[in-house]
Amino acid sequence: MITLNDYTPIVGEEVVSQLYRLAERLKGRRFVHINSTAVGGGVAEMLARAIPLLNQLGLETTWEVIMGDPFFFEVTKAFHNGLQGFRVQLTPSMLEHYRQVNLENAKRFAWEADVVMVHDPQPASLIEVLRPQARRWVWRCHVDVSRPHLPVWRFLRKIVRQYDASVFSMPQFAQNLPHPQYLIHPSIDPLSEKNRELTEKEIQTVLYRLGIEKDKPLILQISRFDSFKNPVGVIQAFRLVRRHTPCKLVLAGGEATDDPEGPAILAQVQEAAHGDPDIQVLLLPPDAHHEVNALQRAADLIVQKSTREGFGLTVTEAMWKGKPVIGGAVGGIVLQLRDYHTGFLVQSPEGCAFRIRYLLHRPQLAHRMGQMAREFVRLHFLITRHLRDYLTLLILQANPDRRLVEF
Ligand code: UDP
């Protein structure tokens, strides 16, 4: 079992002992997280890593996953798309079904908690039924709400305003709400199967198993098959690069149980890649952490050409592996990639192609940027910093009159 002390060699003794000091003030408090999928996507990824560590720190922390039928997840995907700016239509029957499914889920939840953290819009309306079961309710938004489609946000805002606080991943996402809003960046766990060091043999074994021959520079994007991740834009960029520079592209992704659009987007990607021997589209199972790790380590360059992005853990993961990343200049990717330092931001397939070529022809710069990227992640985006932010938030929620927490 991984313990907090195992992080000391990576982040230093002070960071770990600070966590113990903060947690001392929260011993025995009950902390419940609720989201809508146990696997697939960044939220499940982070919860799976954070919950055991919060328990080790002495907080009684549990994780609930709401269930829903396909129509429910169509509705919540429409919320997701609307919050990220698509002009989606919500009908009264969709909204009614959304509330009804949460009502059914609420019947299963008998706990009492000090603080409940509800992740994203899917379970948000649980507060309307379960409010008395917890002292404080916090809404944790992971999506890019910088430019929401207003009818969707207006509906959700009526629910979110009932919470005691909200958490966003970057200041640009903050909203007009009648309660405190906190800024917490997501994180990765350097000791997880997804991010731990791998031997060259382990990497080669995965490449062999997946049928990837590394005879040319390898460009990689790992993402759920989601239109905001823009996999077809990556193919366009790749083809521009390949006109002059030999290389191959792997687009690897899985499905999340709360994302019903995956198969349609995967079909579009397969069609766009059809017949191209230099493009491989891989559908990975949700627990393919080792494979994702090996692919990221095998790649020469990593792309995350999203058009909206709450944060983009795939960017963080790649940076931690010392890889130069080229990402869409949107949402949380902007927090991570600093041009010429920790990566490159791009706005179009042409810009992406330009930067891929630029880096493929400058291996030393690519290597230096990768090293800086890793250090940037070590300082800002590892799970220990995330735990510190959670503990601080919990202390503030337990003492609503306080504005400051001394470490
Ligand atoms: N992921 C994975 N397998 C896949 C696709 C994605 O394990 O086939 C992981 C990825 O490594 C990352 C998370 O899912 O840890 C995606 O988080 P991100 O913030 O990049 O995007 P989200 O899916 O939450 O929008």
Image (cartoon, rainbow, N blue to C red):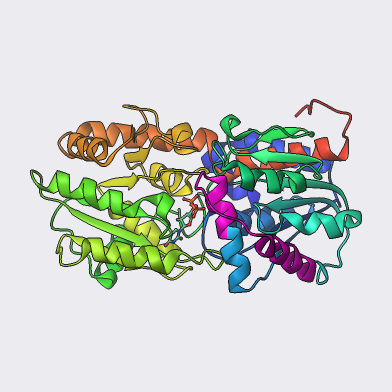
Residue 94 lies in magenta, yes or no?
Answer: yes
**Of 392 and 235, which appears nearest the observer?**
235
Instruction: Work out whether 353 lies above or below 56.
Output: above
Q: What residue lies at 79% left-to-right and 29% top-to-bottom?
A: 405
Q: In the drawing, does residue 137 fall left or right of residue 145?
A: right
**Of 151 and 142, which appears nearest the observer?**
151
Q: Toward which corner of the image does residue 15 lie, by quadrant? A: top right
Q: Position of residue 98 (x, y in %)?
A: 69, 63
Q: In the drawing, does residue 129 fall left or right of residue 292?
A: right
**Of 216 and 243, which appears nearest the observer?**
243
Q: Toward which corner of the image does residue 176 lie, by quadrant? A: top right
Q: What residue lies at 63% left-to-right and 39% top-to-bottom?
A: 168
Farthest-out residue, left: 244
Q: Position of residue 17 (x, y in %)?
A: 69, 38
Farthest-out residue, right: 132
Q: What residue lies at 10% left-to-right and 45% top-to-bottom?
A: 245
**Of 405 and 255, which appears nearest the observer?**
255
Quadrant position of the N terminus in the picture:
bottom right
- What kind of secondary structure does the magenta stretch mostly adopt? helix
Q: What residue lies at 64% left-to-right and 33% top-to-bottom?
A: 174
Q: In the drawing, does residue 99 fall left or right of residue 311?
A: right
Numbered range of the magenta stretch: 77-105
Q: Is residue 388 visible?
A: no
The number of callouts visible is 0
Residue 178 lies in magenta, yes or no?
Answer: no
Q: Position of residue 331 (x, y in %)?
A: 49, 37
Q: Position of residue 211 (x, y in %)?
A: 23, 70
